Image (spheres, rainbow, N blue to C red):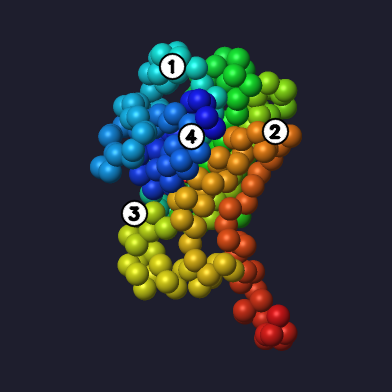
């Protein structure tokens, strides 16, 4: 990554901070953008304030860069909000952050990436590959993001490669809040074949790989970083073949 410039959206905390750190450790110049500055700034990582839902501001940000080799569309997420009794407007905001904003940023970054023969890495989620009760719009947006990446990869080849990392559960600052303290995190970890949640650095390593020359022939691909995924629930509910 020497002398390459990487932008990581939402790189101020959580998964994005792990990705920003991995690029910095690989020798890239890294810029992270989010609405608020990081509480724990990373060495050698520059911060730029940006609301990714503000399209003119996103274009102005990318236009102001001297060059760009890698765009990691990481900013995303959603509050738990079951569908019944809610207003579609609130779900549209979730789609805007998780699907429209990565498209906006990619379009704004395209000319830079084309000139540099660079790449886009989308941060997807296992929620986009299975039902996502409680975060339905988020799951739908992440499914759409993976499909968007595949179309973008075809339209922008051969100059720009576009890939998705399909992320499972990650041990971020918010994991204890999401899963119910240390006991909740431990219980949830036992459901993962590798026996633990991902660290943000696990996702960072995969992102650096996809952006690197080692992945020069990989585009339009999805890389599962989920520790083996989810054991099918029916296996434990079935009354026969318990040993499998
Ligand atoms: N954590 C997991 O277990 C997990 C699992 C699968 C996939 N993922 C994916 O990984 C990515 C990061 O998740 P995370 O858990 O690290 O989330 P997080 O801790 O909530 O961090 C989200 C980041 O995005 C920024 N952000 C949010 N809204 C923004 C906006 N409108 N404009 C600019 N920046 C914005 C936040 O900064 P500001 O709030 O200051 O703007 C923050 O830097 C997401 O795409 C998520 O879907 C996470």
Q: Where does the N terminus fall, quadrant-wise?
A: top right
Residue in the picture at 65% in, 33% down: 213
User: What is the distance, in whole Å, between disc 1 and disc 4 at their CAs?
Assistant: 18 Å
Where in the figure is residue 118, as x and y percent of width and height?
Answer: 60, 25
Q: Badges 1 and 2: C-beta atoms under 8 Å apart?
A: no
Q: Badge 2: how crowded within 10 Å, few (<14), some, or many (20+)?
A: few
First of labels 3, 4 by sequence position = 4
Q: Is residue 201 left or right of residue 128?
A: left
Where in the figure is residue 113, as x and y percent of width and height?
Answer: 58, 20
First of labels 1, 4 by sequence position = 4
Q: Is residue 94 left or right of residue 209?
A: left
Q: Which residue is mark 4?
A: 27
First of labels 1, 2 by sequence position = 1
Residue in the picture at 68% in, 85% down: 242
Q: Badges 2 and 4: C-beta atoms under 8 Å apart?
A: no
Q: Dividing the picture into quarters, in which one does residue 114 lie? A: top right
Can you see residue 92?
no
Q: Which mark is residue 173?
A: 3
Q: Give the secondary structure at mark 4.
A: loop
Q: Which residue is mark 1?
A: 65
User: What is the distance, in whole Å, between disc 2 and disc 3 at their CAs?
Assistant: 33 Å
Where in the figure is residue 45, as x and y percent of width and height?
Answer: 37, 33
Q: Badge 4: how crowded within 10 Å, few (<14), some, or many (20+)?
A: some
First of labels 2, 4 by sequence position = 4
């Amino acid at each position: 990554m020497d002398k390459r410039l990487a932008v990581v959206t939402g790189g101020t905390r959580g998964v994005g901070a792990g990705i920003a750190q991995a690029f910095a450790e690989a020798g890239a110049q890294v810029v992270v953008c989010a609405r608020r500055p990081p509480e724990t700034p990373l060495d050698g990582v520059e911060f730029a304030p940006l609301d990714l839902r503000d399209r003119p501001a996103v274009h102005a940000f990318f236009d102001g860069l001297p060059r760009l080799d890698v765009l990691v569309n990481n900013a995303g997420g959603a509050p738990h909000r079951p569908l019944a009794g809610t207003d579609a407007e609130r779900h549209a905001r979730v789609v805007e952050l998780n699907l429209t904003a990565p498209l906006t940023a990619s379009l704004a970054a395209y000319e830079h990436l084309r000139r540099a023969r660079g790449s886009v890495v989308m941060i997807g989620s296992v929620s986009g590959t299975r039902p996502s009760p409680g975060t339905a719009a988020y799951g739908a947006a992440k499914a759409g993001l993976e499909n968007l990446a595949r179309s973008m990869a075809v339209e922008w080849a051969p100059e720009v490669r576009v890939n998705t990392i399909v992320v499972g559960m990650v041990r971020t600052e918010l994991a204890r809040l999401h899963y119910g303290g240390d006991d909740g995190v431990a219980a949830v970890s036992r459901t993962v074949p590798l026996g633990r949640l991902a660290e943000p650095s696990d996702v960072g390593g995969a992102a650096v790989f996809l952006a690197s020359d080692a992945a020069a022939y990989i585009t339009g691909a999805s890389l599962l970083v989920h520790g083996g995924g989810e054991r099918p629930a029916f296996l434990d509910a079935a009354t026969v073949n318990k040993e499998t």
